[in-house]
Image (cartoon, helix red, strand yellow):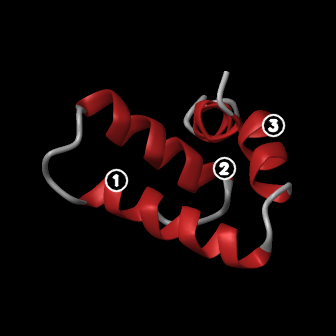
Amino acid sequence: MDPLELLWDQLLSRQPEQILAAYNRLSPDEQVDVLRHLGRMASEPGWHTEQVLSARAALNALGERA
């Protein structure tokens, strides 16, 4: 599996431990980018319902408001 695909698989897993482990391996700049992208996924139209739910679960696991 592609490393980027694996990262997003983990971030969108809805498993808090897996989400935190993946997020904590990122650099601070990458973390900011991931949070922005998850925020867009959770709030902007056009995303599949399951993607929205996964993004919200990731934001919740990371202590961000979904």
The quarter of the displayed image where residue 49 is located: top left
Sequence order check, earlier mark of 2 and 3: 3
Q: Residue furthest left?
A: 45
Residue that carries the numbered disc 3 in the rendered image? 17
Q: Nearer the viewer, residue 64 or 50?
A: 50
Q: Is residue 66 visible?
A: no
Residue name at image x 84 percent, y 57 percent: 24
Q: Nearer the viewer, residue 62 or 3?
A: 3
Q: Position of residue 3 (x, y in %)?
A: 70, 36
Q: Which mark is residue 54?
A: none
In the rendered image, which quarter contains the C terminus?
A: bottom left
The quarter of the displayed image where residue 7 is located: top right
Disc 2 to disc 3, C-alpha distance: 8 Å
- In the figure, is residue 29 to the left or right of 34? right
Residue that carries the numbered disc 1 in the rendered image? 42
Residue that carries the numbered disc 2 in the rendered image? 61
Residue name at image x 34 percent, y 28 percent: 50
Does dot 2 land on a helix, a strand or a loop? helix
Residue name at image x 22 percent, y 42 percent: 47
Query: Mark 2–mark 3 contact, CB under 8 Å?
Result: no
Name the amino acid type tagged 2. Answer: Ala
Name the amino acid type tagged 1. Answer: Ala
Disc 2 to disc 1, C-alpha distance: 13 Å
